[in-house]
Amino acid sequence: MGLRGLAGGALNLAIATPLVSGVLLVIQAALLANVLGLTIEDGVPLLSVAPLIGWIAALILLRALLAVLGEQAGQAGAEAIKQSLREKLFGHLLAGRHGLHLAPASGAVSAGVVDQVEAIEPFFARYIPAMISAAFLPVAFVVVLMPIDWIVGVLFLLTAPAIPLFMALAGMGAQAATDRQASAFARLSGHFADRLRGLTTLKLLGRQKTATEEVYLASEDLRRRTNAVLRIAFLSSAILEFFAALGVAGVALYVGLTFLGLLPFHPELTLVAGLFALIMAPEVYQPLRQLAAHYHDRAAARSALVEIERHIAKIDALALASPAAAPVTRHGPAALSVRALDVVSETGASILNHLSLDLRPGEAVAIMGPSGCGKTTLARAIARIIPASGSITLDGRPLEEIAETHLRNTLVFITQKPRIFHGTIAENIAFAAPDAAESAIHAAAERALVNSFADELPNGLNTLVGEGGAGLSGGQAQRVALARLFLTDPSLVILDEPTAHLDGDTEARLLDAIFEFCSDRSLIILTHSRPTAHRADRILRLAAGELLPIPHRLHAVGENRGDNRT
């Protein structure tokens, strides 16, 4: 699979410990057979064989320690592989994402990063050591037994190979069933996560019953497929136990009949040799039992990797639709042209209807309109976050032809409800530029008036905030998001209600900073605030899916930038 190297020496240790334990097992069985032979056949007192019994106890303890060591090493190696795989997968998803729309679905992506990666752990931690043990130890045990009694060795050679043969036949069906189960699990994860995220919308549209039925049907499909996998797994175990019991019973029958003198051949079989063969008989099949117990882990891991590769293929397919990213350099303010833009909801309702918009380089346009009229939808379409029909060009270049990296550096969109994660205020600001110097972060915080409230906190910008902005008010979270803007260098800025939660004085000061920053950039502000709108060069009103001009005092482009008048 190409992943074993990520585990370092831990996985090699997990593989070596069962093999070493197998060598110690042969010594332990030989000592035990000799102790029983001396005490039963020769009548030697127990005290005389006490040293041998001590060695047996020491070997049992040592093998137990090796088992624990091997399990811990396998777990450590699997964890290293999972961590590395998750980092690479997550980095691939970030590097290859095409816009911010959900393709593949976020639930399916999370299932790949979390659940599917988790499914490969048993394969590396348990299956690989068991597979190598099953490949070497039974053969080694037979080689040891052949000089002692060749008939016992032949019995093992006849029964042991039948186990992996029939397990392979059962494994073919198990792999197919596991692939179907993994696909069903990914569908259920995507279904549930996406329906949960849109729960409010579903309730508003009266579609919660349909969504519940869809999740129920997906879960029932997963249940049926999981039961099919379990049936095949039980069948595989039954095959193993049948042949193992057959082999052990055959050895026991042969040894017993030989000691009773009922077999005319092989009269030289001694008690010690017979006991050694009987003790080793179940141990010959034990590695195969271990392999059967973890055989399903192989099918689960392969199915999980197929699902992960499927997600990566979807991301790559979307990334191929966008050309390779060129070096990002800003060439002044951007020109934007929107023609015949149509956006419809999932229910088929029209949100934007043949909308057109022209934004000259360096122009500031305010778009007003009642809540729900489609202002945010327009911004998300321009930012290539949602699919839309029509034409959108940025500096004369179709939006769909712009490389993802270039677009995200050219265009910055600050939403009305910015994403604040668990961490310090400074870390949240630096999210826009992870390599930003501490001085730049402090300057951005000062510009966005974050310091006006952060200075009153115990640790200032190093104060922790909770997931989703817990501990911050709506206006404070908005200012943290605007501070991110001041760490970037875009050509086009789109702001959605940037001052919605602020008092008049703070709003005016923040608008001064925003318009000063955008003095050599193009700007679109979505707002309900007339003072904010009158700062722009042009005001448009969005109604019935179309943009309509609002009479505005004549201004030259950029004349109002930084003006405090309302």
Image: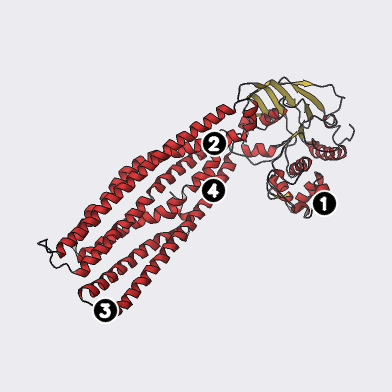
Q: Secondary structure at mark 3?
A: loop
Mark seen at residue 456? 1
Q: Residue at x 43, y 61 (%)?
A: 70
What amino acid is found at the position of numbered circle 4 in the picture?
Answer: Arg
Q: Is residue 483 above or below residue 493?
A: below
- Residue 474: quadrant of the picture: top right
The CA distance from mark 1 to mark 2 is 43 Å
Closer to the observer: label 1 or label 3? 3
Mark seen at residue 86? 4
Q: Is residue 140 above or below residue 179?
A: below
Q: Is residue 206 above or below residue 449?
A: above
What amino acid is found at the position of numbered circle 2 in the picture?
Answer: Gly
Q: Is residue 105 visible?
A: no
- Work out whether mark 4 precedes mark 2 in sequence or the reverse, and give the earlier one: 4
Q: Are marks 4 and 3 in contact (CB under 8 Å)?
A: no
Residue placed under numbered mark 3 in the picture: 45
What amino acid is found at the position of numbered circle 3 in the picture?
Answer: Pro
Instruction: Please tell me how crowded label 3 is: few (under 14), some (14-19), or many (20+) other residues with Cα within 10 Å.
Output: few
- Work out whether mark 2 precedes mark 3 in sequence or the reverse, and give the earlier one: 3
Q: Is residue 506 visible?
A: yes
Closer to the observer: label 4 or label 2? 2
Q: Residue at x 34, y 41 (%)?
A: 172
- Work out whether mark 1 precedes mark 2 in sequence or the reverse, and give the earlier one: 2
The CA distance from mark 4 to mark 3 is 61 Å
The CA distance from mark 2 to mark 3 is 70 Å
Residue placed under numbered mark 2 in the picture: 190
Q: Which residue is farthest bottom?
A: 48
Q: Are marks 4 and 1 in contact (CB under 8 Å)?
A: no
- Work out whether mark 4 precedes mark 3 in sequence or the reverse, and give the earlier one: 3
**Residue closer to the observer: 181 or 414:** 181
Residue 296's x, y, as percent? 39, 47
